[in-house]
Image (spheres, rainbow, N blue to C red):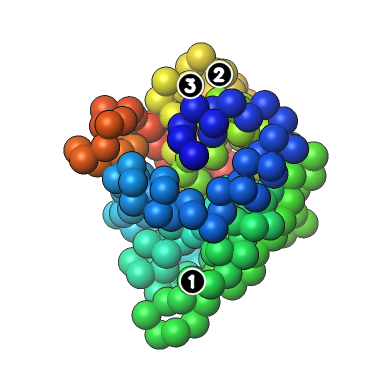
Amino acid sequence: MDLDKAYSVKTPEDSRRLYAEWASTYNETFIKANDYVYPRTIAQKFDELIPKSDIQTVVDIGCGTGAVGSYLANLRPNLNITGVDISREMLAEASKLKRIDGSPVYHDLIEVDLTAELPKKSFDAMISAGTFTHGHLGAETFISLIALVRFNGWLVIGINAEHFLSQGFGSALQNAQDQGLTTHAQFHNVQIYGPKSAHYGDLATIAIFQRLK
């Protein structure tokens, strides 16, 4: 499996097929093989910049095999983390993850196509890495997901930097700000892959903002 196959997906069914095949080897053939540092970096940004008070529940969008949740649970052991993904096979891998105390990383795991429906839940914060990009979740879904976060809750959303403008994420976020739906975002450009990777230099833009209404 490689990035070309990941970027080739066009429909939710494409995603289901790809990740059903990839789930059992994803951690070895993608995360380790590509020195994929993005999950650790976004978890660190969350811990560094999001207040610890009043943040108890977090939803991890496109959680996959659970890399982001694992790092976040280690940094903030008291967080109640829900993972959401379209692939039941990826969720099955995430369900195996344990915290230092032996409890599951994820309090709940939800299989859902977010382009069609949203879970009927509300969270104090949202985190996501690797999901808002070409062929996965687009700008329209990105804005709709703000509804999953309570008023004044926080969002820490990583978006492939190459696609931030070309796929409409930047303009969608600007419109949300102009409408008073969100605060103005802080932006942090970070490496997706470490220096050992052939893809070193690929960047993600992490947008950090709050829901207002």
Q: Amino acid at mark 2?
A: Gln
**Secondary element at image label 3:** helix
At 50% from the left and 46% from the top, the residue drawn is: 128
Q: Which mark is residue 167?
A: 2
Crowd class of label 2 (few under 14; some 14 to 19; many from 20; radius 10 Å) = some
Q: Position of residue 203 (x, y in %)?
A: 33, 29
Residue under pointer 1: 97
Crowd class of label 1 (few under 14; some 14 to 19; many from 20; radius 10 Å) = some
Residue under pointer 3: 163
Q: Amino acid at mark 1?
A: Leu
Whether residue 184 is visible: no
**Secondary element at image label 2:** loop
At 62% from the left and 65% from the top, the residue drawn is: 92
CA gap, disc 2 to disc 1?
A: 33 Å
Q: Do residues under tags 2 and 1 come within 8 Å of each other at their CB atoms? A: no
Q: Position of residue 182 (x, y in %)?
A: 55, 36
Q: Do residues under tags 2 and 3 come within 8 Å of each other at their CB atoms? A: yes
Q: Is residue 74 left or right of residue 109?
A: left
> Reading the chain from its start, which is encountered first: label 2 or label 1?
1
Q: Is residue 200 left or right of residue 207?
A: left
Q: Quadrant of residue 35?
A: top left
Q: Could you say which is closer to the camera, residue 206 or residue 104?
A: 104
Q: Is residue 149 left or right of residue 183?
A: right
Q: Could you say which is closer to the camera, residue 116 or residue 134?
A: 134
Q: Amino acid at mark 3?
A: His
